[in-house]
Image (cartoon, rainbow, N blue to C red):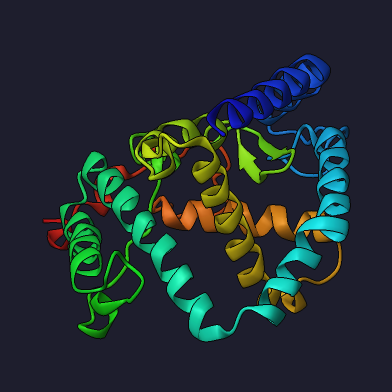
C-alpha cells in the first residue's frame, strides 16, 4: 500500500510540475505585482486543467466501482455492525491525531486524542465501541499536513491525486509520515493489510453517501473550495483569503487551552 501511494503521489507531482511550471511561475509573478493572471480561474489552482482530468478519472472509478460498493455495503451490512467498524478506524485515527498534536505543541488536544485512544482501546474493546465520547472526551483530528502548516509550511498549489482525491503540494507528501504511524504499517501479513485498507476505504465511502446531496453546481470547484477551507480551519488559519501565508500569526493560537 505504501509503495502504491508513494508511486501515485510521485507520478502526479512530477507530471504536474513538468506540464504546468510556466503557469505557476506566471501566476506568482502576477500576484507579486498585484495583478490577476488570466490563465488561471482560481489563485490556488494553477494546475486546474490537469487536476480536472484527474478528477474526471476519479469520478469514473467512483461511479462504476467505489460508490456501488459502498451502497452495497450499506444495504447488506446492518448499522449495528457498521458503527463498530467505523469506531475502530476512528480510534486508529485518534492515535495519529494525538501524535501530530504533540508535534504541533498542542498538548490539550494531544491529551484528548491519546486519552480517547487509551479508553476506547481498552474499555471500548479495541476501539469498536466509542466509550470516550460517552464521557465527553472530545476529538481533535489532525495529521502531518496540519503539523507542517502549524509550523509555517505554505500549502502550495491545490492537487487532485489519482485514486486519493483532493490534496495540496504540502499535504500530499505528508500522507507518508502518517502512514508510518498508522496501524496498516504494523500489519506484516500482506493479505490482511490489503483487507484492512479495503474495509477502511469502503467505510469512508459509505459515510460520504450521506453528504453528497450537499454538493451543488460544479462538483470539482465545490470539493476544491471545501477542502482548502476545511484544511485552513484545521490548521488554525485566521484568514481564508490568505492563500500562501500559512504560518502567519501562529503564536496567536498558543493559549491556555493548549496546555
- Residue 55's x, y, as percent? 82, 46
Looking at the image, is 128 positioned above or below residue 163? below
Numbered label tally: 0
Image quadrant in which the C terminus is located: bottom left
- Residue 23's x, y, as percent? 80, 23
Q: Residue drawn at (25%, 39%), measured in percent from left and top?
A: 103
- Residue 156's x, y, as percent? 59, 32
Q: Residue drawn at (40%, 46%), measured in percent from left and top?
A: 143
Looking at the image, is 176 positioned above or below residue 115? above
Looking at the image, is 29 positioned above or below residue 125? above
Specify the quadrant of the image occupied by residue 152. top left
Looking at the image, is 46 positioned above or below residue 104? above
Q: Residue drawn at (73%, 77%), measured in percent from left and top?
A: 214
- Residue 150's x, y, as percent? 35, 41
Q: Residue drawn at (68%, 29%), measured in percent from left and top?
A: 8
Q: Is residue 203 left or right of residue 97?
A: right
Image quadrant in which the N terminus is located: top right
Specify the quadrant of the image occupied by residue 70. bottom right
Amino acid at each position: 500500500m505504501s509503495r502504491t501511494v508513494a508511486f501515485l503521489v510521485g507520478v502526479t507531482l512530477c507530471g504536474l510540475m513538468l506540464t504546468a511550471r510556466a503557469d505557476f511561475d506566471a501566476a506568482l509573478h502576477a500576484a507579486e505585482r498585484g495583478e490577476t493572471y488570466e490563465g488561471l480561474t482560481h489563485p490556488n489552482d494553477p494546475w486546474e486543467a490537469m487536476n480536472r482530468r484527474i478528477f474526471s478519472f476519479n469520478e469514473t472509478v467512483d461511479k462504476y466501482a467505489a460508490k456501488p460498493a459502498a451502497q452495497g455495503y450499506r444495504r447488506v451490512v446492518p448499522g449495528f455492525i457498521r458503527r463498530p467498524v467505523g469506531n475502530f478506524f476512528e480510534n486508529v485515527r485518534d492515535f495519529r491525531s494525538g501524535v501530530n498534536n504533540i508535534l504541533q505543541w498542542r498538548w490539550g488536544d494531544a491529551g484528548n486524542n491519546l486519552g480517547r485512544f487509551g479508553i476506547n482501546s481498552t474499555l471500548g474493546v479495541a476501539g469498536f465501541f466509542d466509550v470516550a465520547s460517552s464521557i465527553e472526551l472530545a476529538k481533535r483530528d489532525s495529521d502531518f499536513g496540519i503539523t507542517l502548516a502549524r509550523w509555517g509550511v505554505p500549502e502550495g498549489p491545490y492537487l487532485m491525486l489519482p485514486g486519493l482525491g483532493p490534496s495540496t503540494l504540502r499535504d500530499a507528501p505528508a500522507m507518508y509520515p502518517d502512514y508510518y504511524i498508522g496501524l496498516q504499517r504494523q500489519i506484516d501479513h500482506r493479505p490482511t493489510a490489503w483487507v484492512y485498507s479495503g474495509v477502511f476505504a469502503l467505510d469512508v465511502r459509505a459515510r460520504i453517501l450521506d453528504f453528497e446531496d450537499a454538493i451543488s453546481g460544479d462538483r470539482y470547484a465545490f470539493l476544491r473550495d471545501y477542502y482548502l477551507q476545511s484544511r485552513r480551519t484545521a490548521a488554525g488559519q485566521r484568514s481564508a483569503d490568505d492563500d500562501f501565508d500559512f504560518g502567519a500569526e501562529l503564536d496567536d493560537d498558543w493559549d491556555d487551552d493548549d496546555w
